[in-house]
């Protein structure tokens, strides 16, 4: 199927069938050696040591005071190798952070970003297209992964949703990406731009590094305790702050979705107001025909984050009234 230049058409294909997107450039860092899993286990917020090969998890790397330094996926490749996947902008910073710890363990760190091509396949029929293309389907758990090959070129398929639908990353050589896209297209996937995934993930209420997730964010503010935090794993960087938040039961602000009039000018950076009081800021926004609204993701102060709360966004064209919805947004 041809590449779609329309975000609206692309999102419709994402929700109704399946799309394929070239997301090559995502950070790919490999940590290998007998201490690889133990090293990462002591650094990130989720369980690593107990992950069996072929499984993975969502995690964050925090400062000692509990603020985010990185969001990442941890993939256990073997007993002695762990692969980290992250936003392109985090590849270099994360490499620098890990270089400070690797020398104190029996581990080797390797930046594989330039050697890794990534195609993301997502939509209700993603698994059918994957199998029709002769690619392996991982186990049902999030971040499960399976190795295979395409015309003799190694591939690793990872189960991950980036826009709220069933999805997979297909990791391979960058030179194999054009043939992989052609193959997926021939099996029914619409080839679309990364803008479609971005629109889809906002519509689904999912945070992204560089938008909702930054170095000022506490993971619980973004709801990452649902997927990226283990409260039973033991010590890691920033654990005391995360544990304190759990004990006392709240943070001072939370990520929510605001459902606003479709076509309004709400944009990142706009103030969110309750009457005359500024109670938050917009981080991402997109028109959603599916929800008949402009969906704006925003951090708002505690007390204004309950679903149904009436708030307004101060846009460049004037105030846009809307209501709070909890994230992630359901289908």
Image (spheres, grey):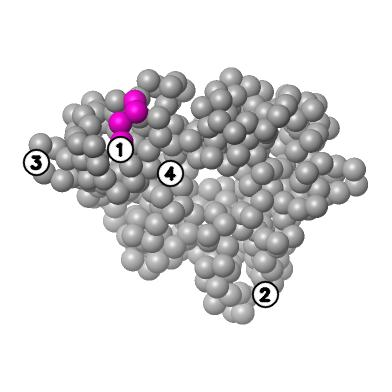
Q: How far, Cα to Cα, is label 1 from label 2? A: 50 Å
Residue 232 vs 168, above or below: the answer is: below
Q: Give the magenta part as a residue range.
A: 262-266
Q: How far, Cα to Cα, is label 3 from label 4? A: 27 Å
Q: Residue at x 55, y 73 (%)?
A: 96
Q: Is residue 129 left or right of residue 229?
A: right
Question: Residue lying furthest left in this view?
Answer: 276
Front in this rendered view, residue 146 or 161:
161
Q: How far, Cα to Cα, is label 2 from label 4? A: 34 Å
Instruction: List x then y, in percent, for residue 235.
Output: 45, 63
Q: Residue at x 66, y 51 (%)?
A: 24
| Neighbours of disc 1 within 10 Å: few (<14), some (14-19), many (20+) | many
Residue 59 vs 5, above or below: the answer is: below
Which comes sooner in the sequence, label 1 or label 2? 2
Predominant secondary structure, magenta span? loop
Q: Which element is circle 3 on? A: loop
Which comes sooner in the sequence, label 2 or label 3? 2
Q: Which residue is mark 2?
A: 106
| Neighbours of disc 4 within 10 Å: few (<14), some (14-19), many (20+) | many
In contact (CB < 8 Å): disc 3 and disc 1: no
Q: Which residue is mark 3?
A: 276
Which comes sooner in the sequence, label 3 or label 4? 4
Which comes sooner in the sequence, label 1 or label 4? 4
Q: Residue at x 34, y 60 (%)?
A: 216
Q: Which residue is mark 4?
A: 207
| Neighbours of disc 3 within 10 Å: few (<14), some (14-19), many (20+) | few
Q: How far, Cα to Cα, is label 3 from label 1? A: 17 Å
Q: Residue at x 80, y 52 (%)?
A: 175
Q: Which element is circle 1 on? A: loop
Instruction: List x then y, in percent, for residue 79.
Output: 72, 58
């Amino acid at each position: 199927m041809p590449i779609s230049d329309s975000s609206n058409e692309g999102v419709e294909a994402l929700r109704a069938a399946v799309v394929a997107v070239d997301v090559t450039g995502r950070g790919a860092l490999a940590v290998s050696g007998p201490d690889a899993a133990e090293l990462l286990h002591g650094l990130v917020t989720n369980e690593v040591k107990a992950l069996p090969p072929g499984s993975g998890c969502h995690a964050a790397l925090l400062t000692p005071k509990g603020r985010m330094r990185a969001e990442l996926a941890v993939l256990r490749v073997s007993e002695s190798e762990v692969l980290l996947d992250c936003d392109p902008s985090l590849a270099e910073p994360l490499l620098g952070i890990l270089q400070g710890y690797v020398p104190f363990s029996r581990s080797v760190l390797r930046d594989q970003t330039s050697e890794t091509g990534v195609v993301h396949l997502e939509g209700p029929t993603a698994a059918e297209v994957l199998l029709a293309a002769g690619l392996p389907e991982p186990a049902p758990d999030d971040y499960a992964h399976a190795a295979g090959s395409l015309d003799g070129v190694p591939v690793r398929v990872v189960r991950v949703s980036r826009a709220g639908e069933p999805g997979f990353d297909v990791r391979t050589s960058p030179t194999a990406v054009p043939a992989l896209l052609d193959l997926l297209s021939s099996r029914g996937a619409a080839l679309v731009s990364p803008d479609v995934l971005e629109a889809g993930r906002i519509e689904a209420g999912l945070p992204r590094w560089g938008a909702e997730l930054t170095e000022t964010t506490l993971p619980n503010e973004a709801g990452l305790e649902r997927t990226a935090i283990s409260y039973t794993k033991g010590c890691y960087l920033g654990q005391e702050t995360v544990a304190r938040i759990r004990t006392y039961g709240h943070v001072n602000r939370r990520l929510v979705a605001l459902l606003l009039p479709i076509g309004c000018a709400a944009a990142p950076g706009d103030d969110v107001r309750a009457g005359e009081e500024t109670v938050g800021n917009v981080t991402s926004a997109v028109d959603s025909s599916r929800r008949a609204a402009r969906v704006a993701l925003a951090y708002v102060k505690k007390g204004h984050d309950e679903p149904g709360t009436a708030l307004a966004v101060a846009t460049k064209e004037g105030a846009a009234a809307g209501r709070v919805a909890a994230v992630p947004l359901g289908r």
